[in-house]
Amino acid sequence: MRELIELKELAISTKEKLIKIFRTQKREDKNITLYAIFQIAPNKKETLNLLIKSLDDNNCRIRETACHCLGVLGPKAATSIAKLERLAKNDKYRSVRVLAKEALRRIKEY
């Protein structure tokens, strides 16, 4: 049991460090950091808020990653529907539009 508590504390610490890196990181590979945060703490409100905020990022790779992660969350990401609908209709990148539509499908499916 002690090992599980230590592992949880390590994951929380790692997530906090990754969020700090994400906020200060230059554009290249920022989407990988966002995905790592999602993998470590997918059910945290802070992660959901970061994903939703990332839908407005200028970098299409970050928007793609956010769309994918929100789709994986499914109905838990219902607060992102309005932004995803906007991206699905208006994003200049086809890949973002496709991933936004897929995320919407998965969120509304359940």
Image (spheres, grey):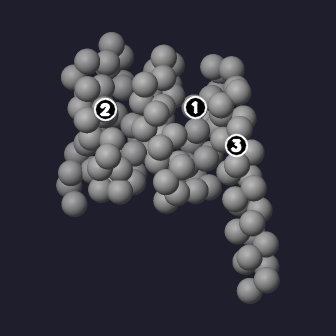
Query: Residue 66's x, y, as percent?
Result: 45, 37
Q: Are marks 2 and 1 in contact (CB under 8 Å)?
A: no
What is the spatial separation of the Cα atoms under label 3 and label 1, in whole angstroms? 12 Å
Q: Residue at x 36, y 26 (%)?
A: 96
Q: Quadrant of residue 29?
A: top right
Splitting the image into 4 quarters, where does residue 74 fall? bottom left
- Dot 3 falls on a residue whose secondary structure is helix
Give the number of the mark in front: 2 or 1: 2
Asked if residue 39 is positioned above or below residue 80 in the image, the reply reads: below
Q: Is residue 16 above or below residue 1?
A: above
Q: Amino acid at mark 1?
A: Asn
User: Can residue 97 be seen?
Assistant: no
- In this view, the residue farthest toward the bottom is 1
Pick whichever of labels 2 and 3 is earlier in the sequence: 3
> Residue at horizontal 27%, vertical 40%?
81
Left or right? Give the position of 85 relative to 20. Answer: left
Q: Residue 25: horizontal and vertical position, in percent?
A: 70, 26
Q: Is residue 38 visible?
A: yes
- The numbered disc on residue 31 is 1
Please, what is the three-letter code of the amino acid marked with disc 2?
Lys
Give the spatial CA distance, label 2 vs label 1. Answer: 18 Å
Q: Quadrant of the N terminus?
A: bottom right
Residue denoted by label 2: 83
